[in-house]
Image: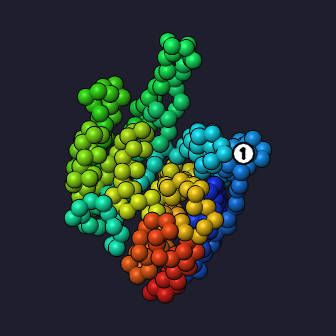
Amino acid sequence: MEKTYRIAVIPGDGTGPEVIAEGLKVLKAVAEKVDIKYDLIHYDFGGERYLRTGETLPDSAIEELRQADAIYLGAIGHPDVKSGILEKGILLNLRFSLDQYINLRPVKLYPGVETPLKEKGPEHIDFVVVRENTEGLYTGSGGFVKKGTPDEIAIQESINTRKGVERCVRYAFEYCRKRDKAKKVTLCGKTNVLTYAFDLWERVFYEVGQEYPDIEKDYAHVDAICMWMVKNPEWFDVIVTDNMFGDIITDLGATIQGGMGIAAGGNINPKGTSMFEPIGGSAPKYTGKNIINPLAAIVACHMMLDHLGEEEAARLVERAVMEVIQKNMKSMEAGKMGVSTTEVGDLVAKYIHSME
């Protein structure tokens, strides 16, 4: 019996609905091309719903989302909602509740996209960051003592479990083997200062690495990683790291691959429901202007298809994205693309239909 995928769609805030609309346009085109069946289930979680109801993400919705084959997310973040409420109540809640313990961030420079790195091109910038997604400083462990006084103390604790570290590291090695490029995994840490957490990470990294003799193992401090991502990005194949460092270096990665307009990511539970999204945020100042770049959302659709095992469809979407970049777009920056948001989606869909 032919499978019908259940895809939960959360357009979210700001320009999220605009870019997701173009991603769904592309999904429809490629599904028609290679005969993929899917049902969409739409959810209105985000700032407007929170302001209307005071609700971020009800428990009943988490159980519904657990039954989906994938979640397609636009953006979370509303200028009228205090920072942290939506991010914790929706994004972190989903990652933790659905055990999406891997944040997967390809850093890939497509032909025709400008990078701020001098004399670097697509042959130099093509690596992946595997970020632990449910532990570290993001667990919310800690608290205040004497809050609001001159003697106030704030404590934020990084929680790293053997189980959490090992499954993240193992995923990185498996992904590197599947990727089959330079066959190197680099651990990004800070063993000289964070001596407890990264002692655990380093020991697990090399212990698990013994099971992968075909893959080169490497270690670098996070500050050196940042330097080399700018100076020698070609040194990297797969980088594995904790939650906080991963959050930081992936934004640097987005910059060197051409900006937030092209950067996408996945929140992965290899045995459960995973979520795919553009990483640029809700960009409220561009809302409704039809000038935001939807390619990051379309690349997120490509990642979602690849994760679902629809490799031909994923390949067609990526090829069409590259065609649009090289033939139709002047820039990745909102308002400077030379085409509108909806025209980008139309063009990607058009190229998919014309491909052999």
Let me know if residue 311 appears in the view. Answer: no
* Closer-to-camera residue (355/171): 355
Q: Does residue 133 lie above or below 264 as drawn?
A: above
Residue at label 1? 50
- Quarter of the picture containing the N terminus is bottom right
Residue at coordinates 52% horizontally, 46% vertically from top-left?
100
Q: Does residue 204 lie above or below 47 as drawn?
A: above
* Closer-to-camera residue (74/184): 74
- The answer to whether residue 218 is left or right of residue 280 is left
**Mark 1: which secondary structure?**
helix
* Closer-to-camera residue (108/3): 108
Rendering coords of residue 212 (x, y %)? 27, 48
- Quarter of the picture containing the C terminus is bottom left
In terms of image quadrants, where is residue 244? top left
Tell me the amino acid under the disc marked 1.
Tyr
Question: Badge 1 local density, few (<14 within 10 Å), some, or many (20+)?
Answer: some
